Amino acid sequence: MAVADLPAGQAPEAPRDDTPAIRTKGLTKRYGQFTAVDKLDLVVKYGEVFGLLGPNGAGKTTTILMLLGLSEPTAGTARVLNMDPARSPLAVKRQVGYLPDNVGFYGAMTGRQNVRYTARLNGIERRTAEERIDALLDRVGLSTVADARVDTYSRGMRQRLGLADVLVKEPSIVILDEPTTAIDPAGVSEVLDLVRDLARDGAAVLLASHLLHQVQQVCDRVGIFVAGKLVANGPMGQLAEQLGAGPIEIEITAPGLVDELRGVAERVAGVTSVTTDQRDERILIVSATSDVRTELARAFVAAGHPPSHLRRRGDELDEIYRRYFAASETEAA
Amino acid sequence: MTADSRSMRLRGESGRGRRRKRGLPRPEAPTPATSESARDDRVPGLRPGWRVIAAKEFADHVLSVRFLVLTVVLGLAAAAAVYASAGGIREQAESATGAPSLFLYLFTLQPQGSQIPSFVYFIAFLAPLLGIAFGFDGINGERSEGTLPRLISQPIHRDDVVNGKFVAGLAAITIIFIAVTSIVAAIGVLQLGILPGPEDVVRLLIWIAMAVIYVGLWLALALLASVVFRRAATSALVAIAVWLLLTLFAALVVGLVAGIIAPVSTEATVDQQIANLTLQQNLARLSPNQLFTEATQAVLNPSIRTFDIVALIQVGSEQRAIPSILSLEQSLLVIWPQVVALIALTATAFAVAYVAFMRQEVRA
């Protein structure tokens, strides 16, 4: 996989061997008849951000709980830091920072006290802990309210406190479950920057989310997770190829009469049909068996209609995502 | 502290056994063989998680409003009781020379005609509230605040949560008992000028230990309720309902049941009456309240030598044993069954809460 060669080498802290931070084989979790996670094969390497993208109830959180040893798999194996989380939960949890969905804090304690408690649970020596807490609270922009009760925090502030809380143990794997919900847009980009920094420092980041645009912005690789199954997995660009089935759709707009343009498009080899967009008639939608953008452009230029807009549909995560989700919903129905 | 060692033993009994059954060895600190250990800049060997949790929970308890309120309420009840019994002791002291330790009367004596019950009665009645107060929102509070997933994703075992909370509750309760008992003792010393002898002190300490075990039972029950019920209000109500059932209605129910099984008619023989009374007593002993009351009486009143009804009748009426005082060891022998039963009940209640928590889904 292309991302495998990504900058693990840049990180001074990351282990140089090729053992991935997280590897699961056939990981399965059943609750009675219901299969929450179905034969999941997943690899997350140091220095990369892996996006686990799926609708609510897809089994993302269940998977995370198994990775932390908080839930036992029904079948299959998980290796985290080259350890079995079900057998060495303490060793795993000591180096894996997990930010749960809707993270909660003790309201009667201050933000600083909450993080300090986590540091104590991780056995971090007091002076080191205080230094880290100061630095982290500053990094997530909470240093001014560090000594206010968490009761007074907004949802977004709690979420950012959650990030500080996760990082206080200096984890080599960071697992974030919906880290950007309830954060305002400016906050979101700060959080995503922070996630990128973590990966650059050599940590492996697993980001579970249903917010595709954010995943797209920050993830090196993405796995699309629907109804317990990983239906696609790879770098953003490859997902479309993995999609395989279904014609490729290309949007093209050029000055000129629509019918004339349609004729030009239809003559290009590999094009199966040409229609116009329902919302905007000037946009032609060309269905083809392969990616014929170059040929299309050449034909349009040759015909004297240089295209002003040319875009392959389905290149964006948005559409891939919609397609997978639509498929899963029809299966379910 | 007894509280600590006890919880350790509980964990040993139920926790380790369970883990072994599932084939999961309790791991030590991070395995050195992995390549990750080189990244680890922290002191090897975590503090046991339950200690960190217990320390935090204990601080929470001691600084909480409920701790303050309970201490004040118990303190006032104790002060009222001890003033009343101090008056009674004066009268008693003149009539009965050679009576058992006057100092202990401070705690147990309800003077005739007094409306205010004795200190130990107050404690037996109110102490379960302490346990309930420190336990009813132990687990579901973490759930509703959303802190439980964050807590157990730290490098601790899952049972550390429930163990730590139990230990913290016991520690808070012990402090309240010692404080209140000391207040009573101080008032007694100042009011009456009686100084406790060494044996009095030992008897009091034993009584405090028993009270902590007794309240530990209620703490464990409240924790169980907090595991089972999602809302703190529900678990508090359920725990209080059980408390009322066992302390107030138990006597009525016991009388009723004994009347059905061993009926006593107007012309019942002595044997029938004794059978009825014995049954009543044994049924009443199903309630921890009764066990604790009997244990309290015997340990704080050296002149009590038996609870057996037949023996009491014989000692009291026909054979007229010479009134004498039991030594500490003999008092302990009298209450040994009650103490063992109390410990067993507490251990069982905690084990049930423990197992219930361990079997629960993290996300439930």
Image (tube, coloured by chain):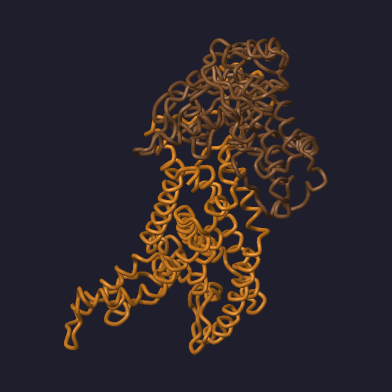
In the displayed structure, A290 sits above or below B306; it is above
Judge left or right: residue B155 versus residue A214. Answer: left
Judge left or right: residue A141 versus residue A79. Answer: right
Res. B257 image quadrant: bottom left
From the rendered image, report the letter of the chain displayed in orange. Answer: B
* Percent coordinates x, y for residue A62 in the rendering: 49, 35
In the displayed structure, A279 sits above or below B66; it is above
Residue at 61%, 59% in the rendered image: B175
Q: Nearer the viewer, residue B125 or A287?
A: A287
Rendered hue of chain A is brown
Judge left or right: residue B35 versus residue B349. Answer: right
Res. A299 image quadrant: top right
Residue at 60%, 27% in the rendered image: A317
* Percent coordinates x, y for residue A262 in the rendering: 60, 20
In the displayed structure, B145 sits above or below A97; it is below
* Percent coordinates x, y for residue A194 in the rendering: 73, 31
Q: Nearer the viewer, residue B230 or B269?
A: B230
Q: Is residue A11 visible to us here?
A: no
Q: Nearer the viewer, residue B167 or A33?
A: A33
